[in-house]
Amino acid sequence: MKKLIFIFVLLCMFSCSDYIDKPKNLVDKDLMAEVLADLTINDQATFMYQDSNLEAGTRFILKSHKVKPNDFVESFKYYVIKDEMQDIANKAQEILLKKDPKADKYIKDKQNNSGIPPIMK
């Protein structure tokens, strides 16, 4: 009887290997990185211009990349649960540094002054 219960428990553990199902319209990792980079720029713009509309900027970015908001949210959840968001965030940071090379110096200065170890390799 104990062996039967043990086998049943093992079957239950291995039958549920995924915590989340893959979304039907999963956003590609590269596209996700591009969207995150643009959302970061949008976030900084709304920080500098307090009267601007963050929601309108977010809608514009998603529309320009041809990504539906629901697909973005579901893909974001999927990548976080699958522990793949760190790689996507690093790609987004590389995209940001390509768009603004001066940002690299700013980031390094901030990291040196605050003692935070560098994120990128």
Image (cartoon, helix red, strand yellow):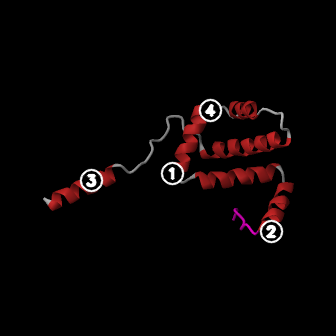
Query: What separation in Å lies between label 4 and label 2 (alpha carbons)?
Result: 37 Å
- Are dots 3 and 1 in contact, CB under 8 Å? no
Of 28 and 13, which appears nearest the observer? 13
Say which mark, if any, is on residue 69: 4
Magenta span includes 101 = no
Q: Position of residue 86 (x, y in %)?
A: 61, 55
Tell me whether the residue at label 3 lies in contact with that at label 2, contact meaning CB atoms closer than 8 angstroms.
Answer: no
Q: Position of residue 67 (x, y in %)?
A: 64, 33
Type of the residue with mark 1: Lys
Q: Secondary structure at mark 2?
A: helix
Q: Is residue 11 left or right of residue 34?
A: left
Could you say whether the residue bearing mark 4 is in a helix, strand or loop? Answer: helix
Query: Which residue was labeled with disc 1?
Result: 82
The residue drawn where x is 79% and y is 52% is 98
**Badge 4 amino acid:** Pro
Quarter of the rendering occupied by the N terminus: bottom left
What's the amino acid at mark 3? Leu
**For the residues carrying marks 3 and 2, which lies nearer the camera in this image?**
2
Q: Given the image, on which type of amino acid does mark 2 rest?
A: Asn
